[in-house]
Amino acid sequence: MNITSLVNVLKKCPHLDFLMFDACYMQSIEVIYELRSCADYIIGTPAETPADGAPYQLILPMFFNTEFTPSDIIETYYNSYINWRSSCGVVFSVVKSAELDIFYSATREKLSKYKSSIYDMNLLSVSQYLNLYMDRWDYNVKLYDIKAFMHAVLSDDEFAEWLTALDGILDSYKISSSIYSEEDPHGIIHIDKDLCCGISVSLPPSLNTTNERVVSAYGNLEWSLW
């Protein structure tokens, strides 16, 4: 099932208080923005989900607590997994849907002046949650942490202004300093915790770096940087 199909199904359901993904790479801004009308909060990881899945024996009872908040989920998930297998790491975040349109406009406006130059920027040091290589796949996709990405691209003043929009959607997040990745040649990805927020973003795909199928899939989403 692709993201647009998922949205079409969820729009037929009652509006959700929160939507949690226990699946890899779902906490991308492209996915989150597509789902903004389906739930008040979206919870997930921008990286690989630990193979054992969420500690449901701890999380499910929370749903029946009147003082439960979505941030309780990622706090429990993070602590449970780190205490058990800290070497693999984990990253999760909670996004509020109410101001996602404001965030979209702010992000698009800030990046508009960099449209022609952004593909030539050196972004190697920007924290990534995924890098699919052309020699292994028939396309190349990089998932950057959106906060780290914007910090690398924008001026200091532009970044400070953009952070206000980020604060409007970011409820909470938990990030370890490194995370396991089956797709990474080294198996471990190191994360700059001070510059990351647990939400990923990818550059709009170019036919110079990926294939037409990926370009088409990206073009069908409502999130577009330009």
Image: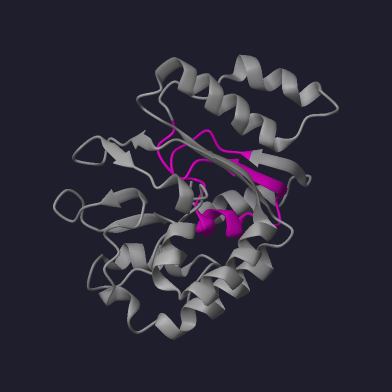
Query: Taking 103 as reference, is 199 left or right?
Result: left
For image coordinates 40% across by 71% down, the residue present is: 153
Q: Is residue 140 part of the magenta span, yes or no?
A: no
Q: For residue 60, which quarter of the picture? A: top right
Q: Nearer the viewer, residue 60 or 221?
A: 60
The location of residue 125, given as percent across then percent down, is 29, 57
Q: Is residue 24 part of the magenta span, yes or no?
A: yes
Query: Taking 195 as reference, is 123 left or right?
Result: left
The location of residue 107, given as percent across then percent down, is 55, 71
Q: Nearer the viewer, residue 95 or 132?
A: 95
- For the record, the magenta segment spans 20-49
For image coordinates 18% across by 56% down, the residue present is: 134
Q: Count the numbered circles shown.
A: 0
Query: Taking 131 as reference, is 106 left or right?
Result: right
Q: For residue 14, which quarter of the picture? A: top right
Vertical order, 139 against 68 (above or below) = below
Determine if residue 36 is in view: no
Outermost residue toward the right in this view = 66
Q: Nearer the viewer, residue 95 or 6?
A: 95
Determine if residue 20 is in view: yes
The location of residue 174, given as percent across then percent down, is 54, 38
Vertical order, 101 against 1 (above or below) = below
Vertical order, 166 against 80 (above or below) = below
The location of residue 136, given as percent across then percent down, is 17, 48
For image coordinates 57% across by 69% down, the residue present is: 160
